[in-house]
Image: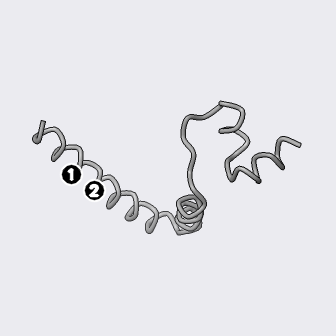
Amino acid sequence: MASKIADVLEVSLDFLLGKTSVELDKKTLKRLQDVQKLNEADKAHVFEMVDAFLRDRKMKKAYSE
């Protein structure tokens, strides 16, 4: 029953039960699943790019405050 409710609301069971504060939309979840299927070198490259982007945004935010 809980699984059906989660499907209707398009959320995970963990989110529905309050076990996580992060809810990923279907598009983001699909992207993460696709990255997970990559070989280790390609995965590392993707996460290096994401880390660099996030670091840049955090620095810009810190300097703008």
Expressed as whole percent of the image width and height from the top left, the position of residue 52 reads 27, 55
Q: Residue furthest front?
A: 9
Q: Identify which residue is drawn at 21% across, 51% down.
A: 56
At x 33%, y 58%, the residue is 48
In which quarter of the view is residue 50 placed?
bottom left
Looking at this view, is 61 or 9 the one in front?
9
Q: Residue at x 58, y 58 (%)?
A: 29
Tell me if 61 is positioned left or right of 20 in this view. Answer: left
* Mark 1: amino acid: Asp
- The residue under label 2 is 53
- 55 vs 3, left or right, is left
Q: Taking 17 as reference, is 12 above or below it?
A: below
Mark 1 neighbour density, 10 Å: few (under 14) some (14–19) many (20 or more)? few
Q: Which mark is residue 37?
A: none
Query: Depth check: 6 or 52 in front?
Result: 6
Q: Are marks 2 and 1 in contact (CB under 8 Å)?
A: yes
- Residue 13 position, x and y percent, is 73, 42
Characterize the local packing of mark 2: few (<14), some (14-19) or many (20 or more) Cα atoms within 10 angstroms. few
- Residue at 44% over, 68% down: 42
Residue under label 1, please give it: 56
